[in-house]
Amino acid sequence: QVQLVESGGGLVQPGGSLRLSCAVSGSIFRINVMGWYRQAPGKERELVASITSGSSINYVDSVRGRCTISRDSAQNTVSLQMSSLKPEDTAVYYCHVYDVVIRKDYWGRGTQVTVSS
């Protein structure tokens, strides 16, 4: 059974930084896409950043230049380094893996990020 466990969320002041990490346990195929989504209160879940097993990276425009996604395919981990955080970055952040071979999505339970003074 595949499980995704996030860590690293918390409360940070505007302009601060946070690093989110996600550990994937269980069996997934090596061809996959790992990423982070977020959902703010009253809003739909949106993609923040993704990285393929071939290291192609995509960012939502609102975080480009402020966030860096990385992965360790050998360890099955994905991280999101966030800086220059803004109050509008406040949301629950979810780790996501899409297994391309069996076309299946996996989600973590989410970690809260709150940007406030």
Image (spheres, grey):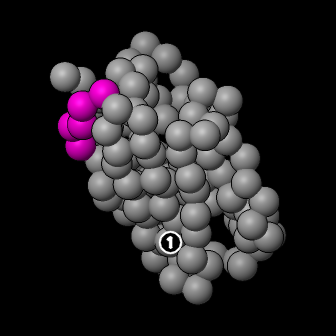
Where, quadrant-wise, is the C terminus in this rendering?
Answer: top left
> 59 or 14, which lies in front?
14
- Looking at the picture, does residue 51 appear above or below residue 2? above
In x, y percent, where is residue 10? 23, 43
Q: Is residue 44 left or right of residue 54?
A: left
- As for residue 12 lying within the magenta part, the answer is yes
In x, y percent, where is residue 98? 68, 58
Residue at the image point whose x is 67% and y is 29% from the top: 61
Amino acid residing under circle 1: Thr
By secondary structure, the bulk of the magenta-drawn segment is best described as: strand
Q: Is residue 98 visible?
A: no
Quarter-of-image position of residue 59: top right
- Looking at the picture, does residue 1 appear above or below residue 74? above
Tally of numbered tags: 1
Which residue is label 1 attached to?
Answer: 77
- Looking at the picture, does residue 97 appear above or below residue 29? above
Residue at the image point whose x is 31% and y is 58% from the top: 7
> 2 or 88, which lies in front?
88
Q: Is residue 39 visible?
A: yes
In x, y percent, where is residue 111? 33, 46
Q: Is residue 88 left or right of residue 71?
A: left
Q: Please provide the residue range marked out in magenta.
A: 10-14
Q: Secondary structure at mark 1?
A: strand
Residue at the image point whose x is 75% and y is 66% from the top: 55
Quarter-of-image position of residue 71: bottom right
